[in-house]
Amino acid sequence: MLGEFEYLLITAAAGLGDGAYGAAIREEIETSTGRTCSIGALYTTIERLETKGLLKTWMGEATAQRGGRAKRMIRVTPKGVRAAKDFYDAVAKVSRGASWVTHRGSTS
Amino acid sequence: MSSTHWSLVEAAALLLEPEEREVVLGDLAEAGEKGLRAVLGVLGLIAWRQVTAWREWRPWLAAFGVAMPGSFFLMGASISVSAGAAAWIYGGALTPAASAQLICEAVLLVAWSWTGGFVVGSISRRTLWVSAALCLSPCTVCLAEFRSQTLSRPCLMVFLIPALAGVLMGLRIRRIPFPIAMTLAVIVTSFLLPKLTTQPGWMSAWAVVWPAWYLVVVARRAKVAEAQAR
């Protein structure tokens, strides 16, 4: 099963679609969670997920905004989508009945 | 970001592999990451990479199985070849037997050093700096202690030239073709057999033999995998 940060990374990459690359994913995670995402944690996790076959990466184009340096583009593989869905289902299942869950099933 | 901080970031990023360096520096530039945070971010990634790399067996083998023991043996071989070359240059013509021995030793020195360098480069790219330090530390000690009327100190380190060529090649490609690997291994082993079994220092002699057979195994596996894929 995925770890919490692995899930965040896969979900952010999936949400960004064709525009998923290191800096964009990092910004997405920081904005969504309010937590700092270090470059070290980001790229070691990306490499680990790629080794597991959950992500695919390749070198993208260089832009002036990046000082003429290339991006590392990222795509979530079908295996990665399944792993993220399993994680989400597990969290949703274990959260049922928790006081902070707002969308509980009707009890009346 | 100030130019000083950015220079620090770029200097730290030199420890990353070229492709990753480009990506990381690009991300930092795009995010407009500020001074110390950027430096710490890059250092953190380097630390992560090193920790991950040293969890595998390959860097240990490259550093303590090839680089360090190999350098002791190859320094001895360097002196032997240098002494033979000095006798040939300054002492006049060598006998045919001595000439053949000198050529043979020179070829072996190149083969041993190149093979060791190739294996170190191909199996421990992220920890190459440790292997390099472990190879150079015996050289540094020996350079300080070396005394000879006829040979200069750099003669100790003749092996570093082919070894460096091997490292550079090993960083670019992971294996060499099977026939070449096999030929190299047979030559390297057959000429070293007496040292492997009888003379003192056989352990460091093994350190220059096994890399050649490692290349044979890697090439053989690749050949089998290619045949199965067809």
Image: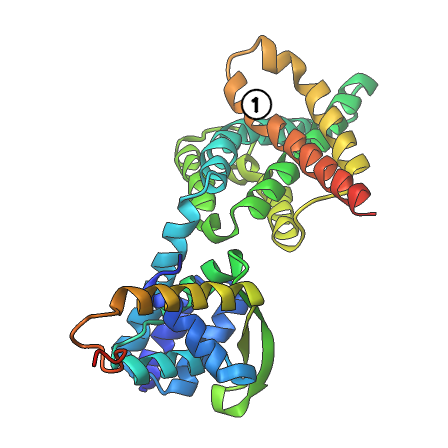
Q: Viewed as shown, does residue B200 lie left or right of B90?
A: left
- Lateral position of residue B174 relative to residue B76, left or right: right
Residue B105 at what x, y percent from top left?
70, 26
Residue closer to the observer: A11 or B213: A11
In this view, the residue farthest toward the bottom is: A64
Give the chain letter at badge 1. Answer: B
Q: In this rendering, does residue B160 appear at all?
A: yes
Q: Which amino acid does label 1 sit on?
A: Trp
- Residue B16 against residue B148 in the figure, above or below: below
Under circle 1, the secondary element is helix
Q: Residue furthest top?
A: B198
Front position in the image: A1 or B27? A1
Read off the residue under disc 1. Answer: B206
Confirm whether residue A22 shows in the render: no
Q: Which quadrant, please, contains the C terminus of chain A?
A: bottom left
Q: Is residue B99 placed above or below A74 in the rendered structure? A: above
Q: In which quarter of the image is residue B101?
A: top right
Tell me the residue at 29%/70% (across/down): B40
- Quarter of the rendering occupied by the N terminus of chain A: bottom left
The image quadrant of residue A34 is bottom left
Number of callouts = 1
Position in image of residue A54 (x %, y %): 52, 63
**Between residues B219 and B199, which one lies in front from this camera angle?**
B219
Answer with left or right where residue B81 lies relative to residue B31. Answer: right
Is residue B116 placed above or below B122 in the rendered structure? above
Can you say whether B198 is above or below A99 in the image? above
Residue furthest front in the image: A108
Residue pictured at 50% horizontal, 86% vertical: A67
User: Which is more toward the observer, B86 or B26?
Assistant: B26
Q: x, y percentage for residue B31? A: 38, 86
Q: Which colour scheme is used?
A: rainbow
